[in-house]
């Protein structure tokens, strides 16, 4: 299962099923609407959000297709991250330059995950609350 990772995505590619396995899977999918899977012997009913993705994957495998799965994270540029944090662009660049907020580069362009900005805001608020309580 070859995989490729970049700063912005993680991708895995899965080979197509054999014709016999694809046919069995296609038959099973056509006969059932149940989206329960077994993981380590434990049955798990998939939530609605996962059901469509898993059924799409299984349907493609049943058609004999190779499948590539990729994550898609939302990344912000410096201006968007600064706006989310309520700070200036320059201050946001300084936060990424000194490692306070993690940053990935696409060429010379900074890309910042929203959750990293929110985590920094939470830490900053907690520090202010600790200072106010002293």
Image (cartoon, rainbow, N blue to C red):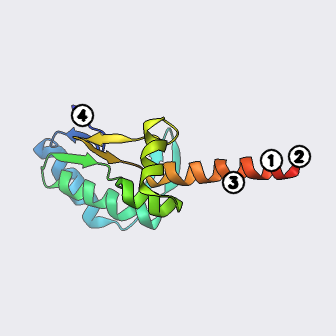
- Tell which circle, 3 or 1, labels the residue nearer the N-terminal end: 3
Q: What residue is shown at x 44% (from left), y 41% (from top)?
A: 96
- Tell which circle, 1 or 4, labels the residue nearer the N-terminal end: 4
Residues at discs 2 and 4 in contact (Cβ within 8 Å): no
Label 2, label 3: how far apart the Cα atoms are: 14 Å
User: Crowding at label 3, few (<14), some or many (≥20) Cα neighbours within 10 Å?
Assistant: few
The residue that mark 1 highlights is 130
The residue that mark 4 highlights is 3
Under circle 4, the secondary element is: strand
Label 2, label 4: how far apart the Cα atoms are: 50 Å
Residue 1 is situated, as x and y percent measured from the top left of the image, at 23, 32
The residue that mark 3 highlights is 125
Residues at discs 2 and 3 in contact (Cβ within 8 Å): no
Residue 66 is situated, as x and y percent measured from the top left of the image, at 14, 45
Q: Is residue 60 left or right of residue 42?
A: left
Under circle 3, the secondary element is: helix
Label 1, label 4: how far apart the Cα atoms are: 44 Å
Q: Vertically, is 80 above or below 2?
A: below
Label 2, label 1: how far apart the Cα atoms are: 6 Å
Asked whether residue 16 appears in the rendered view, the answer is yes
Q: What residue is shown at x 48% (from left), y 50% (from top)?
A: 91
Residues at discs 2 and 1 in contact (Cβ within 8 Å): yes
The residue that mark 2 highlights is 134
Q: Which is more toward the observer, 65 or 37?
A: 65
Residue 32 is situated, as x and y percent measured from the top left of the image, at 34, 66
């Amino acid at each position: 299962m070859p995989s490729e990772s970049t700063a912005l995505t993680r991708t895995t590619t899965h080979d197509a099923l054999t014709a016999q396995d694809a046919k069995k899977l296609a038959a099973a999918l056509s006969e059932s609407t149940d989206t329960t899977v077994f993981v380590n012997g434990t049955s798990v009913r998939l939530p609605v959000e996962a059901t469509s993705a898993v059924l799409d994957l299984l349907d493609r495998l049943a058609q004999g297709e190779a499948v590539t799965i990729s994550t898609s994270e939302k990344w912000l540029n410096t201006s968007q991250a600064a706006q989310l944090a309520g700070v200036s662009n320059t201050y946001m660049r300084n936060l990424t330059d000194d490692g306070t907020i993690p940053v990935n580069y696409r060429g010379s362009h900074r890309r910042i995950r929203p959750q990293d900005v929110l985590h920094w805001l939470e830490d900053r608020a907690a520090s202010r609350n600790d200072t106010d309580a002293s």
